[in-house]
Amino acid sequence: MTSLLKNVPPKTIKEAIWIILVATLLGFLVNLFHPNKIQISGKRPSLPFAADTVPAQDLPGVMITANSSEQEKMVRLLFINTAELIQLNANNQVLLIDVQSQIEFLKAHLPGAKNFPPSKLLADKAKLDSLPQEKWLVCYGNEPGSKQAELVAGDFVTAGYKFVAIYYDGLVGWKKAGYEIEGKKGENYAK
Amino acid sequence: MQNRIWDRILLFLQWLIAAIFIFAGISKIINPGTFVRDVDNYRLLPYLLVTIIAIILPWVEILCGIFLIAGKWKKGTAFSLLVLTFIFLIAISTAIARGLDITCGCFSNTVEGIRLGYTRLIEDVILFVLAGLIYMKSKKDQ
């Protein structure tokens, strides 16, 4: 890499540096006046977690703001963390929805989770109807902040489920917290 | 004759890559929050650096695109694009290797995002090769 850079003419590097400098100037200037400006901070903004003290039944539900068309529905989903998931689970109010692929699901998933990969969930009415309306459908993926979990959660909301949440920490967070998993990689693999 | 055809093809590719980068940059500026989250999801950098990169990177992309179309600072622009696509390549490869279930953040204007996978990797390899071709051409034109 160093030898590669040595072959680059100084004028080229100078131009590249100028581009970065101008981009930096423009970036910070525009960010200053941007309506959704980026807050420069070393601390990640906290997610809209529900407070631990709130009883599970009173957790805020999912709100839908219908726009001009059905397709433009804005879905605000509830994110929960490990502590909240355990709290909900203790009251037997949770059905865990694992959005990983079937292969990944078989390798490892949270105890008692059902596998719902994102594809064609809404089209499978029988599968959708098999889920309880009175329980919290808590979707999660492998990694924290799984977009697939958000997609599936959105599908549940669209299908009319009122108690839908996303377990933000995902399988990785669950394992990191030291809790057991099921599956081929887990301790409780059901043979 | 053959050289002229090749030059025209390269010019077309140059404009194409410029359009892609300008579009990508604008989409990131429109949705800065989504882009910050996308970059953060790679889990490669501390959050402070993530925010700074999210502010600067879209403008680097836009400037590179504009300069490519305008034909100004051609070598520096092509070199910047080469470095940029190389960094993207590393980020995407490591994310795939770590099995991250994230969106790539390439175009942050889509709500559902574009999921990271081998398709994105191949697309980035193509962009990297194109940037390399433009750089070689600009060096030859020197």
Image: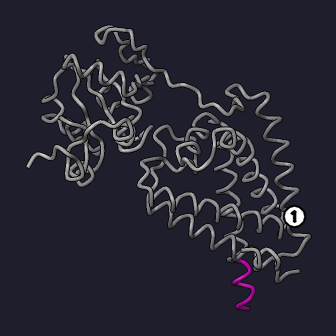
Q: Is residue B31 left or right of residue A85?
A: right
In front of the other: A61 or A186: A186
> How many residues crowd around disc 1 within 10 Å: few (fewer than 14), some, or many (20 or more)?
few
Q: Which residue is mark 1?
A: B72
| Residue A184 picture location, percent across and down | 20, 53
| Residue A77 picture location, percent across and down | 41, 24
Q: Quadrant of the N terminus of chain B?
A: bottom right
> Residue A72 lies in what quarter of the image?
top left
Q: Which residue is at the far left?
A: A191
| Residue B87 picture location, percent across and down | 64, 61
> Residue A43 lies in what quarter of the image?
top right
Q: Which residue is at the far front?
A: A178
Give the residue drawn at x 29%, y 36%: A179
In front of the other: A20 or A112: A112
Q: Chain of mark 1?
A: B
Q: What is the magenta range?
A: B1-8
Vertical position of residue A174 compared to residue B132: above or below: above
Give the residue drawn at x 38%, y 43%: A172
- Three-letter code, disc 1: Lys
